[in-house]
Amino acid sequence: MNEQAAVLGESSPLIGIITEPASLSAAADRPAVVIMNSGIVHRVGPGRGMVRLARDLAERGSVVARFDHSGIGDSPNRQDHTPWPRSTMVETREVMDDLSRRYGSRSFILMGICSGALTSFHVAREDPRVVGAVLMNSQGSEASAEWQRFVRNREWARQYWTRSLFNADSWRRAITGKVQYRRLLSVLGRQIRDRVAPPDDATSVTHSVWAQLQEILERGVQVMFVLAEGGHASDFFDVLMDGKIASLESTGCFHHVTLERCDHTMTLLGNQHDLLREVGTWMDRQWGSAADPSRRMTDHAC
Amino acid sequence: MTSAITAGVEARPLHFGPAQRLFGLYEAPTENATDLGVVLCSPVGHEYIRCHRVCRQLATRLARAGFPVLRFDYLGCGDSAGDSDEVRLEDWVADVSAAIDLVRRRCRRICLVGLRVGGSLGYLLAGQQDVDVLVLWQPVVEGREFWREALVQQEDHEAKFRWAQGESAQRARKPGTTREVLGFPYSSALIQGLESLDLCEHPTPVVERVLLLANSEGADLDRLGARLEPGAAQLDRRVVEERRLWVAEPYEMVIPQQSIKLVVDWISGVPE
């Protein structure tokens, strides 16, 4: 395994690291991996998890690029007026172009946590070179404030019912007047209202994102959702799936896994270990590994 | 592209040091750079992640003020090789020395700037080899306190997410890891180095100009200041009451503008 410091991109310089497998002879035949920023954390990732992920994937035979979007980490701000999130999509595609020039890569797998997952999803929709996407704790797929509120309320209500109700400290605070009663009543009230009549905006956004997901699955893109147990990304996922997971799984391109005892940014070494295991196994199953290329599926059509 | 030029500053990511195992970002003005090169020593572990944006802002502002700046990752950290359970504290001091060697190829004089454990490493290095200017930003004077606070944060996180103490590191099957702090593995040798660290028991650096910057007062910094005073032609001790940036997660970060401005202005005021 070898690592190179690089300045990537075309429209704006992007500081990054390319991790190469020990042998580059098959690099062009195997999808290259691009790992995005996790929110505003720079390219090493929370708890340095993205460094470990990149090195693990390189040992399995992939060329992996981690980079900072403009204005994040070490990359300078853009000098044009390309708005976020459009800029993240432009930059990701430029990094893909860079890898094509350097290694002959023709296909790509995009990965990211949180905003990185969103960028991965939207570039997968736009760019036919994307053959896989690992969406880690993806949330807030659309800018709709009503949809965001709808999902957040579900999360808060779930926390009240599953944690606070059985927590002695929560009851102590409730009895001694240290709870935000107005917020509590508002959340539970909205929960009842949303069950009876979900807001129109929330319903239309859910349908729209569902359609976008179906579109890339039907194109044959392998999509893996990785979720932290009990985190708000799980609520976004549940709203999106709305009990229809089986129909996506039947495509053979849709996979999801929940990491137990895991926070949003997969901080602990134990969480990172679980993540590497799940992503590595998924990669090996779809595209083989340097150790055992025969494990590759011969037909990716869904 | 091998570098990025923005607003008159060229930024070049590179690998350097023994076997090219260290990653760094060298930023320098494209014109009229001074001959005082800055080596910026970052915090370590979870504090490194939290402070990265601040270190980047400081480096960029110093570069725009005319100073070549090298920010780098210690072995086992950031984008450098290895993992942090493979190193000892002395290895990190050696990394600072390698960073200085790189900057000395371009600059006649060296300014070491260190934040938190980065300040501690800068202090230790300056006690071993010559530097011209030293900036210590809330350095860790006593490693035992740093380690205690780190473990509290790890244990709080473990409790919140129902991990038994040490279970996460065991699950990750890293044989060199004795303890973990929020995703960063520590070997027993590194822990021992941190726990036994007391800057006041090490050779006092003899540096002409020293800035000791604190975001909160403390007896340990007073002790360190008293230790530095005899050897420095000019010792400036400043307190800037700003939120302790190393305890805030990146999304909670408020850039400590006053502290950054103070450091840039102070270094800019160092006579040529």
Image (cartoon, grey):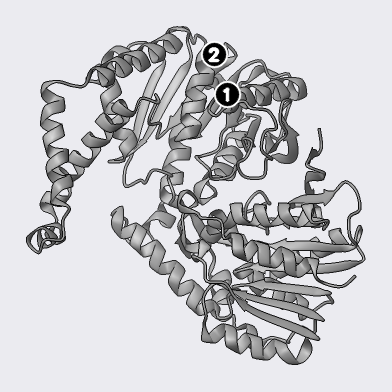
Q: Quadrant of the C terminus of chain B?
A: bottom right
- Few, some or many residues within 10 Å of mark 1 (<14, 14–19, 20+): many
SS assignment at label 2: helix
Mark 2 or 1, nearer chain start = 1
Question: At 63% across and 83% down in the image, what residue appears?
Answer: B199
Chain of the residue under label 2: A
Residue A283 on image: x %, y %: 51, 26
- Few, some or many residues within 10 Å of mark 2 (<14, 14–19, 20+): few
Residue B65 on image: x %, y %: 79, 56
Q: Which residue is mark 1?
A: A89
- Determine whether label 2 and label 1 are within 8 Å by CB: yes
Please tell me which residue lies in front, B19 or B122: B122
Chain of the residue under label 1: A
Q: In the picture shown, does residue A113 fall above or below A241?
A: below
> Is A190 on the left or on the right of A54, as rendered?
left
Residue B138 falls in image quadrant: bottom right
Amino acid type, label 2: Glu
Residue B125 falls in image quadrant: bottom right
> Is B59 on the left or on the right of B50, as rendered?
right
Q: In the picture shown, does residue A179 fall above or below A149?
A: below
Q: Is residue A51 visible?
A: yes
Please tell me which residue lies in front, B209 or B193: B209
Residue A285 on image: x %, y %: 48, 23
Q: Which mark is residue A126?
A: 2
Q: Quadrant of the N terminus of chain B?
A: top right
> Is B145 on the left or on the right of B92, as rendered?
left
Please tell me which residue lies in front, A109 or B230: B230
